[in-house]
Image: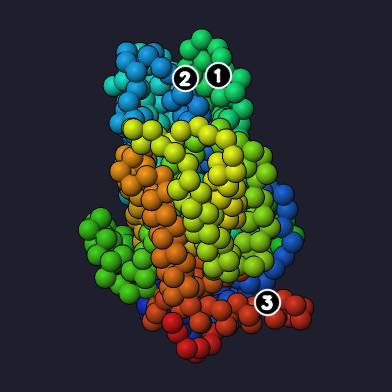
Amino acid sequence: MSSPLSYKPLATQDYDLSETQFIKPHMSKQSSSSLKLNDPQTEQISLDAIEETEMGYFVWILSFAAAIGGFLFGYDTGVISGALVVIKQDLGRVLSDRDKELITSATAIGALVGALIAGTLINKVGRKPIIAIANILFTFGAILQAISKSFALMVCGRLVIGFGVGAAAFAIPLYISELAPSRIRGRLVITNVLCITGGQVIAYGIDAIFYHVAHGWRYMIGLGAVPSMIQLLMMTFLPETPRFLVKCGKRNTARPILHKIYPNATEQEVDNKLELIHRHVYEVDKIVRDRGFFIILKDLLLVGANRRALIIACGLQAIQQLCGFNTLMYYSGTLFAAVGFQNPVAVALFLIDRVGRRTILIATIWGMAFGLAVAAGAFIHIPLDKDGHVVATEGKWPKIVLLGQLLFVAFYATGIGNVPWQQSELFSMKVRGLGAGMATATNWSANLVISFTFLTLMKAITPSGAFALYAGICLLGWIFVVVLYPETAGFTLEQVQELFIDSFGVKKSIAIRKDILKRRADGLEFRRVQLDFPTA
């Protein structure tokens, strides 16, 4: 009789490897144990039992430490908007609009490459090493920019820091989601986004401090190396995720990490959790062992459940960027300093696991479109010079433009600015690395398109036309969410993946979540629900 404490691979015949991606052991001597995991219902209840125990502060500390990478991304986004104003001729010439677009878009190009590389390596080397490498790239890129004396070297520095941004933007949400208990996973992933906003706020403050200092932009950008070095040092003390450790056969190393995440769980509950992780990981590892990139890519694109998860993840990431938010951050940092201090991300931190991801998006994307439409209408009444630039003017219209943009930012930060980074929960483990990497690459591809065309677009169709275009994209995004995006709040990673087996699972997810909330409200034991609801 095998013990659940050992890491002996279980026989293939002990499992029904169905496309549900849940492991359902058959009755056999090899799979039976004191845990009685030969009963699928018992197996899932034991998992859910540990999910319902009280959690300690350890998982929050881990998440905030990891989320410094989000702070770095926010700092870089915010600091470049101020630096572009004061660089003047320090790079050998006065920067044109096209030069500014190249400087900002170079980061997106690097991030696109960095995300794709991270997606192919993260299941081989682990989550921690990718985050550490991202920090090294952050540090080197910041220093390279700070010492730049030519436009070309500045672009190279932006490219290098982009590699780090892309790798971190992919690895950190995955790292946090694999550490987090299911009922607070959304809030923990949002700590990363919260730090992005914090980084932008601090960047604006640094810009203000060095604005009148000779060559102050070098200090603005160079200071970005400090938090990256701090996080690199902290990573030596942070653990790898239990799922990856179990995958590598380091089950005894994963045990104390689970004890810290669930400090009130019993030894048996931790053992049960380890056994369930082991069985899931072993099933996936057996499937992907010795498989090449193109076979995994084929599974991602051709297996229905994986393809539907990819459509949702990539769609949300595209909406996040094509709405135009980051262009406002790149080119209008000073305008949004006050918004950053209000920090509407904190609203999402409170709501995302209570209200749900889908509900938040449906309630906020229309507000983004409304704010952009207000700004577009006001821009009609603001004069432009012969080059298509806005002419500074007095009166109510500039204030209405600001109001519309503030509304847009508030709704963005509460919804689409956060939810897409829950992408790792959508994919099965066998395609999670590649799937999340492709979704992150979609984010940076869209970012590249927007940042490289924003100033040119403003000239070509006027600011009013540009904002109206972004408002239309927001409305299309709202329709996408209503039709295709299921609710996932409170689901375990394995349960989320089961939603996509036959359809996008919108109606099924809503029904299951209602049942989950009802059980919790009634004080009943939380357990997996398998219902045959209509799908959508």
* Mark 2: amino acid: Val
* Mark 1: amino acid: Tyr
Residue identifier under label 2: 86
Residue identifier under label 1: 211
What SS does tag 2 mark?
Answer: helix
Which residue is at the front of the view, 497 or 5? 497
Q: Quadrant of residue 358?
A: bottom right
* Mark 3: amino acid: Leu
> In this view of the protein, can residue 231 be seen by the observer?
no
- Asked if disc 1 and disc 3 are in contact, CB closer than 8 Å, the reply is no
Tell me the distance, in whole angstroms, between the alpha carbons under discs 2 and 3. 53 Å
Residue identifier under label 3: 517
Tell me the distance, in whole angstroms, between the alpha carbons under discs 1 and 3. 51 Å
Residue 394 against residue 12 in the figure, above or below? above
What SS does tag 3 mark?
Answer: helix
Which residue is at the front of the view, 313 or 245? 313
Residue 380 is situated, as x and y percent measured from the top left of the image, at: 45, 48
First-in-chain label (2 vs 3): 2
Question: Residue at left 53%, top 54%?
Answer: 374
- Asked if disc 1 and disc 2 are in contact, CB closer than 8 Å, the reply is yes
Which residue is at the front of the view, 411 or 247? 411
Q: For the residues carrying marks 2 and 3, which lies nearer the camera in this image? A: 2
Q: Which mark, residue 136?
A: none
Q: Residues within 10 Å of mark 2 (few under 14, many from 20)?
A: some
